[in-house]
Image (cartoon, rainbow, N blue to C red):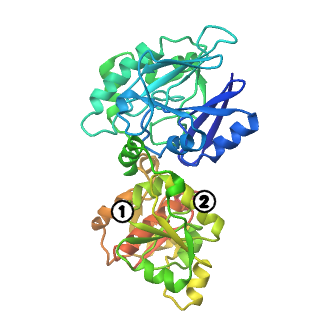
Amino acid sequence: MFIQQLFIPGIAHSSYLIGASKTCAIVDPARDVGRYLDAAKDLGLEITHVLETHLHADFVSGHMDLADITGAGIYAPASGNCEFEHIPVADGTRFEIEDILFEVRDTPGHTPDGVTYVVTDRSRGDDPVAIFPGDTLFVGDVGRPDLFPGRARDLAGILHENLHEKILSLPDSCMVFPSHGAGSLCGRAMGAMRFSTLGYERKYNQALTIADREEFIRSLTEDMPPAPDHFSRCSEINRQGPPLTRTLPEIRPMAPEEFRVRAEQDDTIVLTVGDYTAFGGQHIPGSYHIDIASNFSTFAGWTLPPDRDILLVADNPAQCRDAVTMLRRVGLDRTVGYLEGGTHAWVMAGCATDYIPLISPVQTRAMLEQEAVQVVDVRSPAEYMEGHVEGAINIPAPDLRTRFTDLDPDQPVIVMCRTGHRSSLACSILKQKGFTRVYNAAGGITGHYAAGYV
């Protein structure tokens, strides 16, 4: 048996190839399936099985595309009530890939439909060698149960039961291959290691050490990080079966005048994906900004309206293609075009631009001492509590879509995050809401502390 992990930064998603001598399975594939086709080809293996552990909330799965290309069967939880053609699995379901035995255990809790695949390599022995628990169990954490309104306590209780009865009953030697790692919002305190063993997790995973059911429920239903908007959308997309990517529109280049006319339509938004320093210097008025070098997919899914066409402004066509892939990961499938020649072509055509002053830590400090300014810290509440500029109000960047009314549009606003990336997104939202005196604190709180301002 051979196991290969394929990791996607940003959404911190792990999928897996489980190979035998001639055939293989892919567990929890991402939507950009070329990586799995290439991996299988390199190993000389045929993809015959696509295994889903649950209806993923944070990304759109690639099960439909992979099955369409390879003819593989899709195995998905029976309790997910999936609408696409699949083989439903539940407690006791068993199937084989050559010498590899897969046994299914129902392990809902993070979602109502989760399963764990218990794998035995019978070419070596009869003991289970690995588990693929999806988001039920992570390295250092367990799946959050609060993604379904009104069901958090019930799901947390079910999760406690399944962890102790279905998973911890397996041997300590079992390797644990979860679907997410540190950086994902599907849990709260995931470790940086991308796999572990059940014995190690039994000993050092804090959630697993909580024997009392009520205490466990309380620990998973209080002070959880916010859930992005696209979490509920992606689950339903995955249940219905995502549209095949080959059926989605191809983005095409647009000259500035065509781009301008299209951008003015009510069903369209403009998204700039380049570096935040360039966006601050000059950008198309009213456009969103999400730096492609940041946690792009998550914040795109969190903040962009899913019912609008998207026009891209990027540094080059290759960056546009990367952005389209990352947008599709979170179910944003309506990217239709990009500005040929970028912002430079836009201004050369005589079109209007806007800007957001970028201020250094020294300039930020001077403004705080000399002017009556509003400082908005757009990090998460947990980050804000770790340390912030005195007097700063905490409004996470996505929340500014509605909480901009907490601010006075007639006073200058300094926006700060950890580095300058999220604050640039926040600045773009404030500009859309009519704020004119908006400043991005370049370098964020990191630069502020590095300059000696505490």
Position of the N terminus by quadrant: top right
Q: Is residue 148 left or right of residue 15?
A: left
Q: Is residue 317 left or right of residue 31?
A: right
Q: CA distance from mark 1 to mark 2?
A: 21 Å
Residue under the point 69% across and 11% down: 124
Reading the image, the residue beneath label 2 is 322
Residue farthest along the bottom direction in this orientation = 350
- Of the two numbered discs 1 and 2 on the same chain, state the one appearing first in sequence: 1
Residue placed most toward the observer, 410 or 216: 216
Whether 58 is drawn above or below 2: the answer is: below
- Could you say where residue 198 lies in the image, as x and y percent from the top left? 55, 18
Residue under the point 54% across and 47% down: 31
Q: Secondary structure at mark 2?
A: helix
Residue placed most toward the observer, 240 or 325: 240
Identify which amino acid the numbered label 2 is placed on: Asp
Residue farthest along the front direction in this orientation = 71
Reading the image, the residue beneath label 1 is 307
Q: Mark 1–mark 2 contact, CB under 8 Å? A: no
**Residue 91 appears in the figure:** yes
